[in-house]
Image (cartoon, rainbow, N blue to C red):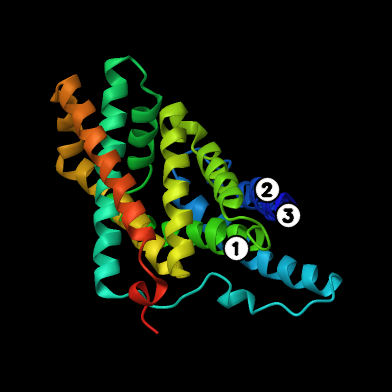
């Protein structure tokens, strides 16, 4: 499990290194994760990571003298049914409100890193580009971290451990937003992992991620996110608690469903 995670993390690190040393000097878009073109940087790095991962995947199994399933089918692209899709949308919305409430609640304690990062990312590109990125980049991220890394790591091992590790990886990648954003990243990783296990379809968690990102930035655009700063501390705590409980019980309820009830053949 750890070997597979380290292998594909090495691929990501290599792609970022190549971007910083070759692409950035040519295009001048800034080092990865910095500057005014973060969403474009992410898109380029994720596409390159998927392509290089395909090469590494095939080399790996040739060395092992095994015949794996097609890399391009690894993530699982089976359709989910309508009721499952609606549930994914509600989970994405609940996480949006949880994320927003925690972010604004931290401002009461003068912890601004979470809010500052969101503001910087929001202002990094025009809103139209941001919304397109929220769809495309989210899908690419989940294909990399869940469809490829998690799928390769979870073979022949109890599923809790690879879910725990991928959740910690997702949380660690939120470092720019501070500890609050990292803890939410870990929680989201668990939701992604268990729901993906139940459906075996990457579309289920892609839908959650897209709803979360587009709604968060949509709320920012219309002023709802900023207006949450006027809510009382108690209101924000209550909102976060209700959304957190919904996510917990929704996921537990979801796990009771059988795959045939969730996925169309």
User: Could you tell me if residue 146 is visible in this image?
Assistant: yes
Q: Closer to us: mark 2 or mark 1?
A: 1
Q: Earlier in the sequence, mark 2 or mark 1?
A: 2
Task: Say which residue label 2 marks.
Answer: 13
Say which residue appears at 29% left-offset and 20% top-offset: 107
- Place residue 84 in its image quadrant: bottom left
Say which residue appears at 46% left-offset and 75% top-offset: 77
Task: Say which residue label 1 marks.
Answer: 151
Alpha-carbon span between mark 1 and mark 3: 13 Å
Q: Secondary structure at mark 1?
A: helix
Would residue 4 appear left or right of 108 to someone viewing this image? Answer: right
Alpha-carbon span between mark 2 and mark 3: 10 Å
State the image coordinates of residue 216 (x, y, percent, origin top left): 27, 45
Are the residues flagged by discs 2 and 1 in contact, CB closer than 8 Å?
Answer: no
Are the residues flagged by discs 1 and 3 in contact, CB closer than 8 Å?
Answer: no
Q: Closer to us: mark 1 or mark 3?
A: 1
Q: Earlier in the sequence, mark 1 or mark 3?
A: 3
């Amino acid at each position: 499990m750890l070997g597979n995670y380290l292998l594909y993390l090495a691929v990501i690190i290599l792609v970022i290194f190549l971007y910083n040393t070759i692409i950035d000097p040519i295009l001048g878009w800034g080092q990865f994760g910095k500057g005014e073109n973060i969403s474009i940087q992410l898109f380029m790095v994720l596409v390159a990571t998927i392509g290089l991962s395909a090469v590494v995947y095939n080399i790996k199994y040739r060395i092992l003298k095994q015949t794996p399933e097609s890399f391009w089918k690894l993530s699982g692209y089976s359709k989910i049914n309508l009721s499952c899709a609606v549930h994914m949308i509600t989970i994405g919305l609940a996480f949006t409100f949880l994320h927003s409430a925690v972010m604004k609640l931290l401002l009461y304690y003068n912890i601004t890193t979470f809010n500052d990062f969101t503001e910087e990312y929001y202002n990094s590109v025009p809103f139209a580009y941001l919304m397109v990125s929220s769809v495309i980049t989210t899908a690419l991220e989940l294909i990399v971290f869940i469809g490829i890394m998690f799928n390769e790591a979870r073979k022949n091992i109890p599923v809790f451990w690879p879910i725990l590790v991928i959740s910690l990886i997702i949380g660690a990648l939120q470092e720019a937003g501070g500890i609050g954003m990292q803890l939410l990243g870990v929680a989201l990783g668990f939701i992604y992992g268990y729901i993906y296990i139940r459906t075996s379809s990457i579309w289920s968690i892609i839908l959650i991620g897209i709803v979360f990102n587009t709604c968060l930035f949509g709320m920012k655009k219309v002023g709802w996110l900023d207006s949450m700063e006027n809510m009382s501390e108690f209101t924000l705590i209550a909102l976060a608690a209700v959304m957190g409980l919904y996510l917990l019980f929704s996921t537990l309820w979801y796990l009771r469903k059988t795959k045939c009830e969730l996925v169309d053949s």
